[in-house]
Image: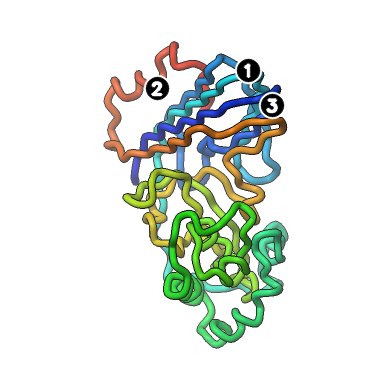
Amino acid sequence: MNVFHIDCELDYDVAQQTAFLLKFLVPATADQRVIVESLTTNPPLRTEQVHDGALPNRLLRIDVPPGRLTVRYLANVEVNRSAPDLEAAELSLGQLPADVLLYLTPTRYCEADLLFPLASRKFAALAPGYRRVESVCQWIRDNIDYVVGTSTLHATARDTLAERAGVCRDFAHLAIGLCRALNIPARIVTGYARYAEPPADFHAVFEAYLSGGWQLCDPSLLSPVESLVRIATGRDASEVAFATFFGAARLRRLSPLVEPMQPQHSPEALAKLQRPESGIQLAA
């Protein structure tokens, strides 16, 4: 079990009345629990949590007037995640649950159909299961350079393959596309993670459906998946963006910090998150 303290701040210049949809709150899942959390906005604004379909993702809606906007989220989160199951098996199409089938099809950023020839040449002959998924990840590490600033928000898995460079989001998209081309359901996961380089940012990994459950994998190897604090899950980056806005705004600063804590929290640590002046209190 690991316990982490999240301190995330988003800072925007807002040019006109703008509706923000933010996806950076930590959800409760089978392997993580929110102990306590708080949210503040400056200026003080009404916020609303919106249901995000069948997934546990938490969507925050804020209507913002022109001016400066700062949103700060504090949380203590307990993560109890097992190491990957190296013997996890692939399932046939007939064995997959109905709600998993959509993670087999091509999407905007993961062109599984167009990646099928490469997936067949490189991985079809390998023994199915977790080790084949890890072979996909290792091939990406061996053939794609991790270089900050080499991709755009519109880059797809095939673009990453053509450029032979990208960041964690691109690594995840390519792995998802190759897995789907092998009939392995796969989806993107964003989260808070600790790593020395590059500078603090949200992290993107993916998970594959094996042996009746989702197995987290990180083709970039930037941070252990056992320590990832999950934020959002989706078919690709179009469904897990940390901020979507309708209006005109410019991001000035992004600071998603995460630090490990002792399992037994001091009263002072909890009080820091729960003090009245910290603003809107969110239910765990």
Is 15 left, or right, of 10 in this rendering? right
The residue mark sitting in front, 2 or 1, is 1
Is 277 left, or right, of 110 in this rendering? left
Q: Position of residue 256 (x, y in %)?
A: 44, 38
Q: Is residue 78 above or below residue 189?
A: above
Residue designated by label 2: 273
Callout 2, which amino acid? Leu
Q: Is residue 87 visible?
A: no
The image quarter containing residue 12 is top right
Residue designated by label 1: 46
Q: Is residue 48 above or below residue 232?
A: above
The image quarter containing residue 183 is bottom right
Residue designated by label 3: 18
Q: Is residue 157 above or below residue 24?
A: below
Neighbor class of circle 3 (other Cα within 10 Å; few <14, some 14-19, many 20+) is: some
What residue is shown at x 60% (from left), y 34% (from top)?
22
Q: Does the CB distance between marks 3 and 1 fall below 8 Å?
A: no
Q: Does the CB distance between marks 3 and 2 fall below 8 Å?
A: no
The residue mark sitting in front, 3 or 2, is 3
Q: What secondary structure is found at the residue carrying circle 1?
A: loop
What residue is shown at x 43% (from left), y 28% (from top)?
74
The image quarter containing residue 272 is top left
